[in-house]
Amino acid sequence: MDQISIHGARAHNLKNIDIDIPRNKLVVLTGLSGSGKSSLAFDTIYAEGQRRYVESLSTYVRQFLSLMEKPDVDHIEGLSPAISIEQKATSHNPRSTVGTITEVYDYLRLLFARVGIPKCPKHQINLESQTISQMVDSIVKLPTGEKIMLLAPIVQNRKGSHAKLLEELNHQGFLRARVNGVVVYIDEMEVLNGKVNHTIEIIIDRLKIREDMISRLSESLETALNLSAGLVRVAPMEEDPSWQEKVFSAKFSCVECGYSLSELEPRLFSFNNPVGACQTCDGLGVKDMFDKQKVVANPNMSLADGAIYGWGRSNAYFYQMLMLVGKYYGFSIETPYEQLSDKHKKIVLYGSGTDDIDFSKIKGRKSWSNKAKPFEGIIPRMMRRYEESEIRSVREELSRYVVSKDCGQCRGDRLNESARNVFIDGQNLSNITKLSIADIYDFFKELKLEGARGQIADKILKETVQRLAFLINVGLEYLTLDRRANSLSGGEAQRIRLASQIGAGLMGVLYVLDEPSIGLHQRDNQKLLNTLTYLRDIGNTVVVVEHDEETIKQADYVIDIGPGAGIHGGEIVAMGSPKDIENNLKSLTGDYLSGRQGIEVPAKRKGASQWLCIKGAKGNNLNKVDLSIPVGVLTCVTGVSGSGKSTLINDTLYALAAREVNRAQTTPAEYESVEGLNYFDKIVNIDQSPIGRTPRSNPATYTGVFSLVRDLFSQTLEARMRGYKAGRFSFNVKGGRCEACKGDGLIKMEMHFLPDVYVSCDVCQGQRYNQQTLEVLYKGKSIAQVLDMTVEQACEFFQPMPKIKQKLQTLMDVGLSYITLGQNAITLSGGEAQRIKLAKELSKMDTGQTLYILDEPTTGLHFHDIKLLLSVINRLREHNNTIVIIEHNLDVIKTADWIVDLGPEGGNKGGQIIAFGTPEEVVKFKGSYTGQYLKAYL
């Protein structure tokens, strides 16, 4: 069968559609945001493909697998086992890194265990182990007739007389020793000075090199090794300056200090295993520490007035304690904190050390004994409470003052000293994981190992290099292997999974992908397309939900879903080759592909006379960047993936501005100075994080519409007669909600070997409220029916109510007419969540002095949705607000008043501003990839 035939698909807003999708082709689903693309791709095609495969497995295996809900479809023919690659964060586990989730790190652990060379941490001497037969072979190569002695080192540069040890060895039959380089008879030795370091080596045997001595030599070596825990030294019987003493080790030991290492094995290089993990940070690479800048809330105030929250006059107990500390050391707690000496600040924050202070006069929580005690210090006390408290609210309160800093022991490497001192070609494992994937690829491609080590490493290196190449091919060459998985964007996580699938080399599979081009610069797009076509060419069907013009044009088959969003979508508008879509006059996608519609280049760019300047930004890969942002205009920050855009804007600009203007508890990345923050009275970061983390959060509650709606219902005649207040119409509190489902509307049913099923509550029929509450109607609708309305329906329903209408209109303006007011926040995509946040900001009173920061707001948006979004952003700009957008979409970039382009590459080859100015100016910069691709759009 050469096609997937779908009949009667009705998932979500799909309108009973029938469609045939060609197999073993690259198929793109496109259409407006909310038109039904994901409903067809993921909730129908993938869900049914996965369900059929999983149901072929045993019930025992099924209990370990999550199964999607059976799609609402009549039947589907021609399906293959399906694999979904979505834009979900890979892991929230702080132990997961790019290296572990790609499994490259597993190969590196094996490589270091098999061919790594351990060194002594102190002397940097190679630690090499040898068998007795290897030692014998080496010794018999000495000139025949040479007189040698075998020495067993038993004391290496240690203080003590060691009399008892020497006496025991003498009783065992050992007669001679070399003490501090001098050969002596043990029973004639004078007692050694116990206050001086000594080196003692027992003479095991004295031999003359000849062919028939091999058996005796082997026995003597074995005796020496047993006595000295694996070390033996070969020295001439008579002093000879030309003679280089030989040291042999049966295990990895340092000949200078005796430092030893057990056999190298892969678990030594795992930071998730106690054998290899740094013991100070347990392999996390970071330690939670209290930031003194956060602890000292207002350094301009005195300690008595509350420079440190909870330690001023308002807390008599701690206030008295600080008074006594100040009295003991001779400083006043009435003095502004910043005027205290560094010594006194250190005592207040970190304690009095060994100095005992009399606290017996303190009145309060407990009576102090007469015995004086050291002052613990504010930060050690907070740390103790943070680590010991089991009360969640206490830990959450204290966590506001906590920052994660690199572990002082391993310096962020996660591994213990032994693992950090194993090298391949001068590099340890930690150094390699800090390199970009492209640099690691080059390192291993050029690595040449000799003899047996080369043969052992060959197969491991081949597999490692192959996996690195897959990651490079999906545009991730700038990532480092030690990058935390929870810091990856959805697009990066998706491309990592895509690289893993290429490595798997499966055939006959149905792949379903969700916008794999997200976060990719136009330069890297072709690499991604080559990867998708490779998956197709080896015999797979690749279905991609995508809005990127280049991807649509290179597809074998395009399905355009629409014509609108929500209830206005769910139909097949056009299908066929990209050319067929272009020529279809009914297709909105075709209009933009053909140029019948488009996003216009502004006739005039808005200029600026005021600037926000950050100098010397050095976070992550930034190379002392000086950033200048014009105030009151739209600035796009561009650059290839990994060039430093997020570090510069989110980690530096936003964190710094939020701290200074919003008084937020944010810690910016390293920078030297900032000017121009006085132009702003508010900083707003509109990112793609969820608007809520529970099913109870929804667009109505987040935007504030629901509070107004509840107030409206409480003012109806029926509500007033019954005495219902606004709280009655909340599904979060007792009173109005259905108590059978606690206001969720759903009941969770555990199905054991099948996935849990959520069924509609049979008491409230999924409406969340009890019958009495549902009897209160506004214009013939209950509160539950209002929550089920789409934004578009609600906007019309509440037309006479200007406050509600205004908030709903902003959701319409950002292209979210199709979502329902009560839609579970967890089901919203990152792009939808970001636009809801933007709508919320639009509905607020505008001061014209706000700095808005947006990170890729075009995620998940069709060409037409982007046009709507730009009109909203331009409204903010017209009110003289400053908008800074991190963006790859060239249609957005061409409308900007100012561009800051970072590069030239990603990772350690990026971190510089390589072009800045208006779009017309940026295209003239030869080193700017953005400028090169932007030319065609102007």
Image (spheres, rainbow, N blue to C red):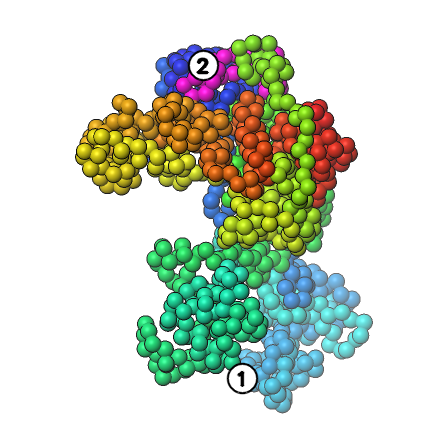
The label shown at residue 164 is 1
Q: Is residue 566 left or right of residue 933?
A: left
Task: In the rendered view, tell whether residue 171 sits above or below residue 690.
Answer: below
Residue 905 on the magenta span: no
Measured as percent of width and height from the top left, residue 83 is found at 48, 28
As rendered, which of 664 and 652 lies closer to the eye? 664
Residue positioned 71% across, 65% down in the render: 139
Find numbered disc 2 in the image and state the secondary structure of the residue it sits on.
strand
Residue positioned 56% across, 20% down in the render: 26
Q: Which residues are magenta?
A: 552-580
Question: Toward which corner of the image does residue 392 lie, by quadrant?
Answer: bottom left
Distance from disc 2 to disc 1, alpha carbons, whole Å, reads 93 Å
Q: Earlier in the sequence, mark 2 or mark 1?
A: 1
Residue positioned 54% across, 57% down in the render: 405
As rendered, which of 607 and 101 lies closer to the eye? 607
Task: In the rendered view, tell whether residue 538 sits above or below residue 113.
Answer: above
Question: Toward which corner of the image does residue 320 lie, by quadrant?
Answer: bottom left
Question: Toward which corner of the image does residue 822 lie, by quadrant?
Answer: top left
The label shown at residue 571 is 2
The label shown at residue 388 is none
Residue 911 visible here = no
Question: Could you tell me which quadrant the C terminus lies in?
Answer: top right
Q: Residues within 10 Å of mark 2 (few under 14, many from 20)?
A: many
As rendered, which of 274 and 799 lies closer to the eye? 799
Amino acid type assigned to the residue bearing label 1 in the image? Lys
Residue positioned 47% across, 80% down in the render: 327
Find numbered disc 1 in the image and state the secondary structure of the residue it sits on.
helix
Measured as percent of width and height from the top left, residue 184 is found at 67, 84
Determine contact: label 2, label 1, CB under 8 Å: no
